[in-house]
Image (cartoon, rainbow, N blue to C red):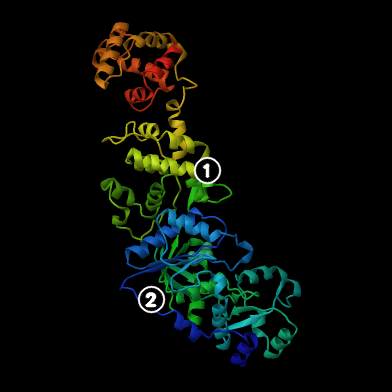
């Protein structure tokens, strides 16, 4: 067959030659050892936690090596396109501090010389490479369509052909140039398939940077490269784009691992060198029964990165928690270097966890508590306000008007060597501190202790003194003694039968009257902030 003629028949009016294209994508001028990575999501309308996890690996690998991290939008499947999706992805990356070096905003700016960064704008490029493969006899047109009957291929297999995952060779590889011409004259649409040389038996080995050496059967599928709307499949676009755009490390979900043999054959057909691959594990979550489930938007709110914004999680906490899932030594490093910049962590993108990452909300909360506990009150206030502006408008006015009071509340037990660790997300602020913004509605007092509770409150009204913390506590002790409570724990432990309880019990009663709770941050700070009048009012309810 005259393949050159075939290529002209199929693509008579393609505008760009491969040579012209390659001139526009020169080798990147980067230092030795610099990595170029990309985040390449489909614009499905939200940023998936798993995607963000990969982007974090991409960013760290590129930035730590003096390379480039860019964003490419894989929007060749127009049915799945959601308007504004790329803005959401870019917005999420940016809000976490991972602004790509190169990206394009639809209808807005393009930063970088290796674009277009939307695959739908690269159609002519894919066509040029498909034409080249046809001209070299390495690809062929396929006219099979679900509706048009498939001669010796069963209907049931058509679905597989359409997705490009089929074990058999495609019938259209045997069409003569006359048959092809006839089909074209009849206006039949065609897809372009790879003419696979695989026999379904030979094996290949490759070294995945995350999984180590993997052995697989070489590709034998005449996979689709261009669909019949002449948009590329993921496989073809991966080879063309990652080569032209200079990607030398591809981080992608492990669901792509089975496609590796196909990618190898496509790269070889095109004469391209393959990048390094990191097939990153998907993130799972345990259900109530302890079974693992892939994190999915349908079942898990945290699959969508917006969840963390809505809940008001600290962004650094989300990042640090995920870093821990990527490199399990992160946690120990953080313990040893509590205030170090995360970029000082000896990250190893090529040694990512071999275990299945399990998303553990409790662990995330702990990381977040730890980080928030180190923030000064003013920073907490700013974070809280920023969260409210996006997610809790009804509280914004109040937060702005009463900045001083709110900051003081945030400062209770903060900015100390052992700061309190009770807040892990800003949406919990008004619940944790409800008693600072109104009288408590319920009280954690055991019925059996109600009489003793009331007795303490009646008496305490006479002893209330907020002038300073020492005096305040001396007075409590005085009252405790008068009512028959031990003023120190040692005495109480020696002769518990002599006392009604110890001074800690007295404090607990006062705390319950003031806050409704048995546990709270520093009681003296709370009482001073509420002020004497309010404190007396709260105690008077019971005495
Ligand atoms: N668009 C593909 C996906 O979202 C990208 C995979 C890759 O990073 O190569 O899964």
- Kindly identify which residue carries mark 1: 287
Residue at 37%, 65% in the rendered image: 62
Q: Nearer the viewer, residue 68 or 380?
A: 380
Q: Secondary structure at mark 2?
A: loop
- Kindly identify which residue carries mark 2: 28
Q: Position of residue 403 (x, y in %)?
A: 40, 35
- Please identify the quadrant where the N terminus is shown: bottom right
Q: Position of residue 3 (x, y in %)?
A: 60, 90
Q: Is 498 on the left or on the right of 445, as rendered?
A: left
Q: Position of residue 85 (x, y in %)?
A: 55, 59
- Please identify the quadrant where the C terminus is shown: top left
Q: Secondary structure at mark 1?
A: loop
Residue at 41%, 39% in the rendered image: 424
Are there few (<14), some (14-19), or many (20+) residues within 10 Å of tag 2?
A: some
Whether residue 282 is visible here, answered yes or no, is no
Q: Is 280 on the left or on the right of 464, as rendered?
A: right
Picture quadrant of residue 485: top left
Q: Position of residue 365 (x, y in %)?
A: 41, 41
Of pointers 1 and 2, the one earlier in the residue sequence: 2
Which disc is residue 30 wearing?
none
Q: Is 222 on the left or on the right of 260, as rendered?
A: right
Q: Nearer the viewer, mark 1 or mark 2?
A: 2
């Amino acid at each position: 067959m005259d393949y050159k003629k075939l290529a002209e028949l199929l693509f008579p009016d393609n505008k760009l030659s491969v040579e012209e294209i390659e001139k526009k994508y020169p080798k990147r001028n980067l230092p030795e050892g610099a990595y170029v990575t990309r985040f390449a999501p489909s614009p499905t309308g939200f940023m998936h936690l798993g995607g963000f996890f990969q982007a974090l690996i991409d960013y760290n690998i590129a930035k730590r090596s003096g390379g480039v991290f860019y964003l490419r939008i894989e929007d060749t499947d127009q049915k799945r396109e959601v308007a504004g999706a790329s803005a959401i992805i870019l917005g999420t990356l940016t809000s976490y501090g991972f602004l790509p070096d190169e990206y394009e905003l639809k209808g807005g700016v393009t930063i970088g010389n290796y674009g277009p960064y939307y695959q739908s704008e690269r159609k002519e490029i894919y066509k040029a490479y498909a034409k080249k493969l046809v001209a070299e006899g390495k690809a062929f047109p396929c006219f099979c369509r679900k509706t048009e009957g498939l001669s010796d291929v069963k209907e049931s297999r058509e679905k597989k052909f359409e997705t490009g995952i089929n074990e058999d060779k495609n019938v259209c590889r045997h069409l003569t140039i006359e048959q092809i011409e006839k089909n074209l004259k009849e206006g039949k649409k065609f897809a372009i398939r790879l003419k696979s040389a695989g026999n379904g038996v030979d094996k290949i080995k490759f070294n995945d940077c995350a999984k180590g050496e993997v052995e697989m059967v070489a590709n034998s599928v005449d996979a689709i490269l261009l669909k019949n709307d002449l948009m590329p499949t993921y496989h073809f676009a991966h080879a063309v784009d990652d080569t032209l755009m200079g990607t030398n490390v591809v981080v992608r979900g492990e669901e792509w691992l089975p496609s590796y043999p196909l990618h190898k054959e496509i790269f070889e057909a095109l004469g391209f060198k393959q990048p390094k691959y990191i097939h990153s594990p998907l993130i799972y979550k345990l259900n109530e029964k302890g079974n693992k489930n892939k994190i999915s938007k349908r079942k898990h709110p945290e699959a969508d990165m917006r969840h963390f914004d809505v809940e008001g999680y600290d962004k650094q906490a989300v990042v640090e928690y995920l870093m821990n899932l990527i490199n399990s030594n992160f946690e120990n490093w953080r313990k040893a270097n509590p205030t170090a910049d995360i970029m000082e962590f000896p990250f190893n993108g090529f040694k990512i966890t071999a275990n299945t990452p399990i998303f553990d909300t409790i662990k995330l909360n702990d990381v977040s508590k730890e980080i928030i506990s180190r923030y000064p009150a003013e920073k907490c206030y700013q974070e809280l306000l920023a969260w409210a502006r996006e997610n809790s408008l009804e509280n914004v006015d109040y937060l702005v008007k009463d900045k001083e009071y709110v900051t003081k509340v945030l400062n209770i037990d903060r900015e100390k060597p052992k700061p309190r660790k009770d807040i892990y997300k800003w949406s919990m602020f008004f619940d944790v501190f409800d008693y600072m913004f109104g009288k408590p509605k319920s009280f954690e007092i055991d019925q059996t202790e109600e009489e003793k509770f009331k007795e303490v409150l009646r008496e305490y009204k006479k002893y209330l003194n907020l002038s300073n913390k020492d005096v305040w506590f001396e007075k409590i002790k005085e009252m405790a003694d008068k009512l028959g409570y031990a003023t120190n724990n040692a005495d109480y432990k020696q002769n518990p039968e002599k006392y009604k309880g110890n001074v800690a019990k007295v404090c607990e009663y006062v705390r319950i009257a003031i806050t409704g709770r048995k546990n709270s941050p520093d009681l003296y700070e709370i009482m001073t902030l509420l002020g004497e009048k309010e404190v007396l009012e709260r105690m008077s309810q019971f005495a």
